[in-house]
């Protein structure tokens, strides 16, 4: 079984993600033992972003990639079975998980394809790039 990075590199709908991971020097992190859950933005997700801006600051890019990575395995059925809750990402910020019209939402993204098993975790392909600066953007706090 392939690791998360090998699985991303072999998936045609994740070609831009693979390039971004390589540019950020993040590939080794996705080859580590894990287990991890990685929310992988697809081609549609990257078409909504300014790639020149995204690739301009490698440190910020690494943080954005860490915002898509969670320790432990979170299968789609587990995400679906709960109501609103959060997952703590590798950059220390939280991703909100909730149901929107019976569809799982992870922050601002839908899961397009879930539960892609890898030797070091699981991948869920999502239709948006998460932005750490907007963590919890739809929640209100007292």
Image (tube, grey):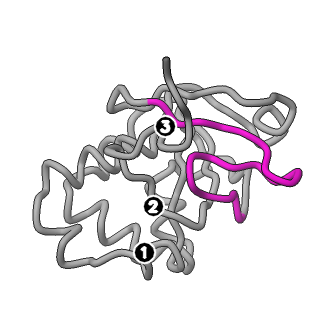
Residue 112 image offset from top left, x and y in percent = 71, 65
**Displayed quadrant of residue 81:** top right
Q: Is residue 6 above or below residue 29?
A: below
Residue 38 image offset from top left, x and y in percent = 52, 45
Of marks 3 and 1, the one in the foreground: 3
Say left or right for 103 vs 86: right
> Mark 2 packing: few (<14 Cα in 10 Å), some, or many (20+)?
many
Q: Are marks 2 and 1 in contact (CB under 8 Å)?
A: yes
Query: Label 3: which residue?
Result: 136
Query: Label 2: which residue?
Result: 129
Q: Is residue 88 magenta?
A: no
Numbered disc 1: secondary structure: helix
Residue 34 image offset from top left, x and y in percent = 48, 29
Q: Which residue appears at 69% of the width and 49% of the height?
A: 105
Q: Which segment did they paint magenta?
A: 94-112
Numbered disc 3: secondary structure: loop
Say left or right for 113 vs 132: right
Residue 31 image offset from top left, x and y in percent = 39, 44
Query: Label 1: which residue?
Result: 46
Q: Earlier in the sequence, mark 2 or mark 1?
A: 1
> Mark 1 packing: few (<14 Cα in 10 Å), some, or many (20+)?
some
Q: Which residue appears at 50% of the width and 78% of the height?
A: 43
Numbered disc 2: secondary structure: loop
């Amino acid at each position: 079984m392939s690791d998360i990075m090998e699985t991303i590199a072999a998936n045609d709908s994740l070609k831009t993600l693979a390039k971004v991971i390589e540019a950020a020097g993040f590939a080794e992190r996705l080859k580590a033992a894990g287990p991890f859950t990685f929310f992988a933005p697809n081609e549609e997700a990257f078409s909504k972003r300014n790639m020149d801006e995204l690739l301009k600051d490698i440190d910020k890019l690494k943080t954005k990639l860490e915002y898509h990575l969670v320790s432990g395995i979170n299968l789609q059925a587990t995400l679906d079975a709960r109501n609103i809750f959060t997952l703590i990402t590798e950059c220390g910020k939280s991703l909100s998980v909730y149901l929107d019209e019976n569809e799982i939402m992870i922050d601002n993204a839908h899961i397009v394809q879930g539960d892609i098993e890898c030797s070091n975790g699981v991948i869920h392909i999502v239709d948006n790039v998460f932005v750490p600066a907007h963590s919890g953007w739809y929640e209100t706090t007292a």
